[in-house]
């Protein structure tokens, strides 16, 4: 069994963190059948302090995964359905003048939560999509010159439809770069799909889920992930991948230093889920495509897409 599909809880964590984490992963897997790797990546993103983009065609379980995570993590939750007429103020909130006090009062929007589901994010116009930028990067929003902090841990899960579907706008590169990981679900295998067809409706099942974790535990797990050791040799390997992306003939824009930091953070979280206090090259390889592919900009004459380019970088960059 590969490191990506292993399920044992981290041995380096105390029981008060290890056991709730193991229950949370198992509970999400009980709803999203046959997608253990994708569920694992979602928890990697959570523990690394990033945000998750789930991209795939309608009906394969993107929103179900987001709802299962929300029900499991014990965080305050809001869902925003992105549409073409959605405005930035519908997300952030608005200041309204109150005659009683002769002053403007800020009324927070649904962004002020701990877990935000941005459903079908690319059905909104780019101006509305960019309303999330400051929140995702700084965990805060500035309205009328006043900065409002968001309650930690702040975790955005966005779903996105393929760009060949009608009524979609591509996310700008600056927005894509704020998502630490991008994943897709695809169709379930035959066994998982038969089990899904025979079971109760996913929405009814999600309604019965109880939180397995508390916000303080998630913050403690993030601190633990940040303390996982990355050796000098491992950092050299990460840097070699960044450099390779910038010199590849089919890549117009390679990976930035921010992408390198995201890759290292995700690899640390993956190592923690594997029960290790140090990062291995296999941890970097397990998360690389999900961290890197959506950040790569293929050149005009590129022979392959972003995902294939990410795999090629892994195959051609040696571990020293």
Image: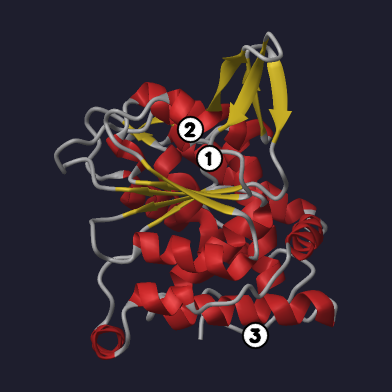
Q: Is residue 61 left or right of residue 4?
A: left
Figure check: 149 above or below 197: above
Q: Residue furthest front?
A: 100
Q: Which mark is residue 271?
A: none
Q: Are marks 2 and 3 in contact (CB under 8 Å)?
A: no
Q: Residues within 10 Å of mark 1 (few under 14, many from 20)?
A: some
Q: Is residue 53 left or right of residue 235?
A: left
Figure check: 2 above or below 277: below
SS of the residue under disc 1? loop
* Residue assigned mark 3: 8
In the image shown, does 124 or 170 lie closer to the viewer? Answer: 124
* Residue assigned mark 2: 91
Q: Earlier in the sequence, mark 2 or mark 3?
A: 3
Real-space Cα separation, disc 1 to disc 3, in angstroms:
36 Å
* Residue assigned mark 1: 110
Q: Residues within 10 Å of mark 3 (few under 14, many from 20)?
A: few
């Amino acid at each position: 069994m590969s490191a990506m599909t292993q399920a044992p809880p981290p041995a380096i964590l105390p029981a008060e963190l290890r056991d709730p984490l193991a229950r949370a992963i198992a509970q999400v897997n009980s709803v999203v059948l046959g997608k253990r790797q994708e569920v694992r990546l979602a928890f990697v993103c959570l523990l690394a302090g990033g945000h998750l983009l789930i991209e795939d065609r309608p009906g394969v379980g993107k929103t179900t995964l987001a709802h299962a995570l929300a029900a499991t993590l014990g965080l305050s939750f809001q869902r925003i359905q992105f549409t073409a007429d959605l405005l930035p103020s519908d997300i952030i909130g608005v200041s309204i003048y109150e005659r009683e006090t002769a002053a403007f009062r800020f009324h927070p929007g649904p962004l002020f939560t701990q877990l935000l589901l941005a459903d079908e994010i690319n059905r909104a116009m780019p101006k509305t999509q960019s309303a999330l930028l400051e929140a995702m990067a700084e965990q805060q929003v500035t309205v009328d010159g006043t900065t409002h902090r968001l309650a930690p841990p702040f975790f955005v899960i966005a779903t996105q439809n393929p760009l060949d579907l009608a009524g979609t706008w591509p996310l700008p590169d600056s927005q894509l770069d704020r998502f630490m990981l991008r994943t897709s679900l695809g169709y379930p295998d035959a066994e998982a799909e038969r089990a899904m067809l025979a079971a109760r409706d996913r929405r009814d099942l999600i309604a019965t889920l109880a939180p397995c974790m508390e916000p303080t535990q998630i913050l403690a797990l993030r601190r633990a992930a940040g303390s996982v050791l990355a050796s000098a040799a491992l950092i050299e390997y990460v840097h070699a991948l960044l450099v390779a992306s910038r010199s590849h003939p089919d890549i117009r824009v390679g990976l930035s230093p921010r992408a390198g930091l995201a890759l290292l953070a995700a690899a640390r979280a993956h190592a923690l889920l594997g029960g290790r206090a140090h990062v291995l090259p296999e941890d970097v390889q397990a998360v690389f495509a999900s961290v890197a592919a959506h950040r790569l900009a293929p050149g005009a004459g590129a022979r392959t897409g972003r995902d294939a380019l990410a795999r090629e970088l892994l195959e051609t960059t040696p571990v020293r």
